[in-house]
Amino acid sequence: MEIKQLQAFTAVTRAGSFSRAAELLDYAQSSISAQIRLLEDNLGIRLFERLGRKVVLTSDGERLLPYAEQVLKLIAEAREMVAQSALPRGTLRIGAPESLCIARLPPVLKEYRRRYPEVELILKLGGSADLHRWLLDNSIDASFYLDRPLISPKLMAQTLLEEPIMLLAAPDHPITTKTPLRPTDLQGESLILTESGNSYRAVLDGFLTEAGIQPGSVLESGSIEAIKKLVISGLGVSLLPRMVVEAELQTGQLADLRWRGPDFAIRTQLVHHKDKWLSPALQALFSLTEELVRAGALTAGGEPSAW
């Protein structure tokens, strides 16, 4: 049993196909197939069922998977520990939603790169469900979350900042006459929202369903900038974190509808797997983020929150 065989095995498991695994590892597909055959011959078992273009684990493969992942994890930790220098080095994979990439992460990433130039930063954008999955399968080392306080038996989360969530419209939109806004005021209104699955969108959907409120229409977009432009043009009402609309509020392009419904309780959080080895590069990220939060460097003129 060799490292390359275990790498090929775990890659095929994650990707669901030999061709995709070959792309992930930058190998030829024939090499991936050969490594899997060698591993199966060595163990005397069948690891995958081939169902057309898709492959799925056999029961023997399912039993082997946690051991293979643990072996590869220990090997990676040993290599990094042996190669440690005075400064963090290696690769750090960070996940985050678009809104935090716009308003919170730039100071963190800029200062991190200045202090630790030997660390390669890889940033993956995704929603809460994506980030949760990537942390569990070790596709990322840590994630900045924008969601309600995370409670998970496998993940550890630290709250960095409370994030006000705002209902917004163009200043001349008729709904501005109803402020402060309550859930019932959204009955029949056109809403312009982030895609389903977004944390604060999901909370709003829950509030409206519980109150029996039916919007007139819902236009979805995966782009925060596109949502802002559509709302400014008067096409509807939107829900966004205050941190991404500060400029538009100051210039009067957007109006705060002063939501008086239930609290969204959204927080910026820094999350990692509870069993994740805290490498020097990862520890440096935690320490730097704490330092910047305490200094108020991640807020737009607000008071820094304790971490």
Image (cartoon, grey):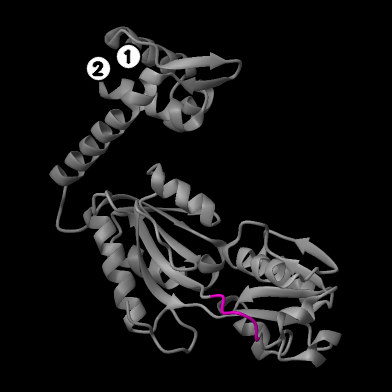
- What's the magenta region? 260-264
Query: What's under tag 1, amino acid-wise?
Result: Leu
Element on which disc 2 rests: loop
Name the magenta segment's main secondary structure: loop
Residue in the foreground of this view, choosing between 254 and 214: 214
Residue 305 percent coordinates (x, y)? 38, 83
Q: Can residue 26 be seen here?
A: no
Looking at the image, residue 36 lies above or below residue 279: above
Q: Label 1: how many residues lie within 10 Å, few (<14), some (14-19) or many (20+)?
A: many
Look at the numbered discs 2 and 1 and tell me whether their residues touch, using CB distance below 8 Å.
yes
244 over 69 or under it: above or below: below
Label 2 – label 1 distance at C-alpha:
6 Å
Report how many numbered discs are placed on residues in the image: 2
- At 78% from the left and 82% from the top, the residue drawn is 185
Side of 282 where 224 appears, left or right: right
Q: Nearer the viewer, residue 226 or 208?
A: 208
Mark 1 lies on a secondary structure that is helix
Which residue is at a point 65% across and 86% down the rendered structure image? 260
Callout 2 environment at 10 Å: few (<14), some (14 to 19), or many (20+)? Answer: few
Q: Which mark is residue 39?
A: 1
Q: Judge whether residue 158 can be spotted in this image.
A: yes
Residue 149's place in the image compared with 253, above or below, is: above
Q: What residue is drawn where x is 24% and y is 49%?
A: 277
Measured as percent of width and height from the top left, residue 39 is found at 32, 14
User: Which of the 4 image quarters holds residue 194?
Assistant: bottom right
Q: Residue 1, which numbered label? A: 2
205 with respect to 236 (left or right): left
Where residue 188 appears, as percent x and y from the top left, is 85, 73
Q: Nearer the viewer, residue 43 or 33?
A: 43
| Residue 44 inside the magenta-drawn segment | no
Res. 101 mark: none
Quarter residue 80 falls in: top left
